[in-house]
Image (cartoon, grey):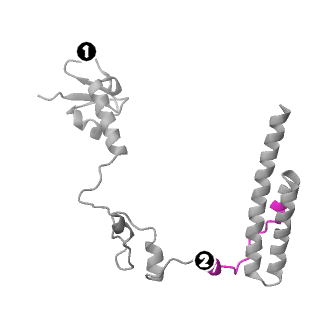
Amino acid sequence: MATKYYAMIDGEQKGPFSLEELPANGVRPSTYIWCKGMPEWQRAEENADVCRLFRNHLYDIMHPAPAENIEVGVDDRWKVTKDEPHQGPYPSRFDRYLQETGNEPLPTLEEIEQRKDTSAPPVSMIGYAWIVTFLCFPPTGIVALVYAYKSKKAWKAGKNTESHEYSRKAKMWTGITFFLGLFLYGAFLGLAM
């Protein structure tokens, strides 16, 4: 006969439960339990059988069994069409793209750049460029400043695409300047100690 457990849940004695029924009935590792043969109530985590059950239960949650009857082949994962986007066992990351464009090939980087929305002004990097120029590393900070001002000038001239490209370069050089400054300050502090 299987061992029956009683548990103290919310201040009330509940049970009897079989070992497998404990997690489903609100028993946690800190819950006090008792079964025939135990001298007194003890926490579930102190009982070897219950502790093993919780470990197995946790393992099952963390490592779910793979779905049955799914054969994953290299070709199946890449068979994606507009009408049937889920040929493989997992949803394709390109489902939305295929629904919008049909079965066209993926765009090149140049095509992506051409599709970018340039109707709104780019983020002004002038303030950031000044800060990193003064606080981090002036030589590359000046490059960031030049691109930031070129971006502003191109936007005023109505050259939206050029303005966005200069802004992108200003962001890149601002980041380079910031990290070079951090590296140099760290090296300086390392040498000073």
Counting from the top left corner in percent of width and height, residue 100 is at: 47, 80
| Residue 135 badge | none
Q: Which residue is depicted at the point 86% across and 51% down? A: 135
Q: Residue at x 74, y 63 (%)?
A: 172
Which residue occupies the foreground of this view, 10 or 95? 95
Q: Where is residue 35 in the image (x, y as percent from the top left)?
A: 22, 23
- Left or right? Give the position of 178 relative to 88: right
What is the quadrant of residue 126 in the picture? Answer: bottom right
Residue 27, visible in the rendered structure: no
**Is residue 103 placed above or below 169 in the rendered structure?**
below
**Element under label 2?**
helix
Other-residue count near label 1 (Cα within 10 Å), few / some / many at <14 / 14–19 / ≥20: few
Question: Was residue 147 drawn as part of the magenta stretch in this picture?
Answer: no
Q: What element carries label 1?
A: loop
- Magenta-highlighted residues: 112-130
Please name the residue that numbered disc 2 is placed on. 112
Residue labelled with disc 1: 39
Does 119 lie within the magenta span? yes
Residue at image position (78%, 53%) is 178
Q: Earlier in the sequence, mark 1 or mark 2?
A: 1
Amino acid type indicated by mark 1: Pro
Q: Quadrant of residue 120?
A: bottom right
| Amino acid at circle 2 | Ile
**Residue 164 in the image, given as x and y percentages of width and height:** 73, 75
Using the numbered discs, state the Cα–Cα distance from disc 1 to disc 2 in whole angstroms. Answer: 72 Å
Left or right position of 184 against 59: right
Of 59 and 173, nearer the camera is 173
